[in-house]
């Protein structure tokens, strides 16, 4: 199948997925329209999207590439190529809250127009028997350079930022996110990360987010949660909830023993101890939850589905440009991270409209190779989506025999 020609480039088609009124409205809201002179807020957004889509390595890389394709940029709502210093100054001085607002409003706009967006994503680790919304909560560390980024230092020789994420495992789309320096512990962000969860929904997180006062608040709000128990957790067994079976070693109803922990969580908990296979090895793991009705195997499967957020972090960090940053200031880092999340949403939306069956990284590399080509993005996906890989090799040649002479 041949690709169809288009009046606009692939980069133009991706950028035009952002509603035309949105950038102007947010620029006025955050006062960026008054700061901008020759380098408009829209040109800034297009430049940062190109940074991620083309996986540019530096300010010069972005500026030189867009200057060489300045004719193409004018067709993208009259965007203009940045100078090296102009792009650096914009990232340093303009409020990154605009990039954050833009990400959430574009995601909300797409969801309002296409309510089924994201639900075609088939994460293999998701338990299919659950009809409730399942959210995984975790964070990823973004390594920075310690000797020139003082605002993000959290150890003597290390600097890093953290992206705390609440991911909807049914759609594989972010539901809540916090991007900040890595100096705070994960449990301190748990209140904000879970503030939007509703009655009947399920939250899954690792033991770094265990705070019994917060877990008790979730229980009072009707939110079900599953996490791992810390090794030093002290408790008293009240009774058996179910009998042990298969890989389930124990299923207890417990109450916390330490006075401070019991004061923070006065109600009873459920403890499930099971043998779990990790990297081909059997390990015994302990899970705690506030739900006493689900089968113990369902508790294990729910926590296993938490690995989906690690897959999400792997997708954005190994494809989008989150390793080399264009600036050292906090604003520049936040601009680049939020625009990476926006680029992820736009690529996922193209995947949804084009009914792409391949992986996210495969589609990313496919679009990156034709950014400035006047091709229809969806016909490119159709032409390359039919590839079945290289033919299989036969270890020994096949031989034909006459009837009755087979060995």
Image: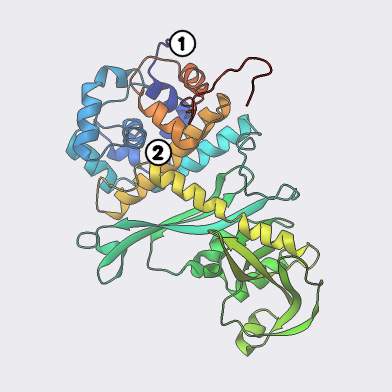
Q: Quadrant of the C terminus?
A: top right
- Depth order, front residue of 14/293: 293
* Left or right of 400, for residue 154: left
Q: Secondary structure at mark 1?
A: loop
| SS for callout 2 | helix
Tell which of 128 and 201 is nearer to you. Answer: 128
Res. 266 image quadrant: bottom right
**Observer able to see residue 77:** yes
How far from the left and from the top, in percent, is residue 209?
54, 68
Please say if 268 is above or below 206: below
Near-viewer residue (49 or 241): 241
Find residue 318 and report its horizontal and vertical position in percent: 39, 44
> Which residue is rendered at x = 78% and y = 62% of the image?
295
Q: How is the image coloured?
A: rainbow
What residue is at 71 percent from the left and 66 percent from the top? 247
Mark nearer the viewer, 2 or 1: 1
Q: Is residue 11 left or right of residue 378?
A: left
Name the residue at the front extreme.
405
| Mark sitting on residue 91 | none
Label 2 vs 1, first from the N-terminus: 1
Q: Are marks 2 and 1 in contact (CB under 8 Å)?
A: no
Residue assigned mark 2: 28
Q: Considering only vertical position in the picture, is 223 above or below 321?
A: below
Q: Is residue 223 visible?
A: no
Q: Which residue is mark 1?
A: 2
Marks 2 and 1, Cα distance to the nearest angstrom? 44 Å
Quadrant in the picture for residue 307: bottom right
Quarter holding residue 8: top left
Residue 173 x %, y %: 56, 44
């Amino acid at each position: 199948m041949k690709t169809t020609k288009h009046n606009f480039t692939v980069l133009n088609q991706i950028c035009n997925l952002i509603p035309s009124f949105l950038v102007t409205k947010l620029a006025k809201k955050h006062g960026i329209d008054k700061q901008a002179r020759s380098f408009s807020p829209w040109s800034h957004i297009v430049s940062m999207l190109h940074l991620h889509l083309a996986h540019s390595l530096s300010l010069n890389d972005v500026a030189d590439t867009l200057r060489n394709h300045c004719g193409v940029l004018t067709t993208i709502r009259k965007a203009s190529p940045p100078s090296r210093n102009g792009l650096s100054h914009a990232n340093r001085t303009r409020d990154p809250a605009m990039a954050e607002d833009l990400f959430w409003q574009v995601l909300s706009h797409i969801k309002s127009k296409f309510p089924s967006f994201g639900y075609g994503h088939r994460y293999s680790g998701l338990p299919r028997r659950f009809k409730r919304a399942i959210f995984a909560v975790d964070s990823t560390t973004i390594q920075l350079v310690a000797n020139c980024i003082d605002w993000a230092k959290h150890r003597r020789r290390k600097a890093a930022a953290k992206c705390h994420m609440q991911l909807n495992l049914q759609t594989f789309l972010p539901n809540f996110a916090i991007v900040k320096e890595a100096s705070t512990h994960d449990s301190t962000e748990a209140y904000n990360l879970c503030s939007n969860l509703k009655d009947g929904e399920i939250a899954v997180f690792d033991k770094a987010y265990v705070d019994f006062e917060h877990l008790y608040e979730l229980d009072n709000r009707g939110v079900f949660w599953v996490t791992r128990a810390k090794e030093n957790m002290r408790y008293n067994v009240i009774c058996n909830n179910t009998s042990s079976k298969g890989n389930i070693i124990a299923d207890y109803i417990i109450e916390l023993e330490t006075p401070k922990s019991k004061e923070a969580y006065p109600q009873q908990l459920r403890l499930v101890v099971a043998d779990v296979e990790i990297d081909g090895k059997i390990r015994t793991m302990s899970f705690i939850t506030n739900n006493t009705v689900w089968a113990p195997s369902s508790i294990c499967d729910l926590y296993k589905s938490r690995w989906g957020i690690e897959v999400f972090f792997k997708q954005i960090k190994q494809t989008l440009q989150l390793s080399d940053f264009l600036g050292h200031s906090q604003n520049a880092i936040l601009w680049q991270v939020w625009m990476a999340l926006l680029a992820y949403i736009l690529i996922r939306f193209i995947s949804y409209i084009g009914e792409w069956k391949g992986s996210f990284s495969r589609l990313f590399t496919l679009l990156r190779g034709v950014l400035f080509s006047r091709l229809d993005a969806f016909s490119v996906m159709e032409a390359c989506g039919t590839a079945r890989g290289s033919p299989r090799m036969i270890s020994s040649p096949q031989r034909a025999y006459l009837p009755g002479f087979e060995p």
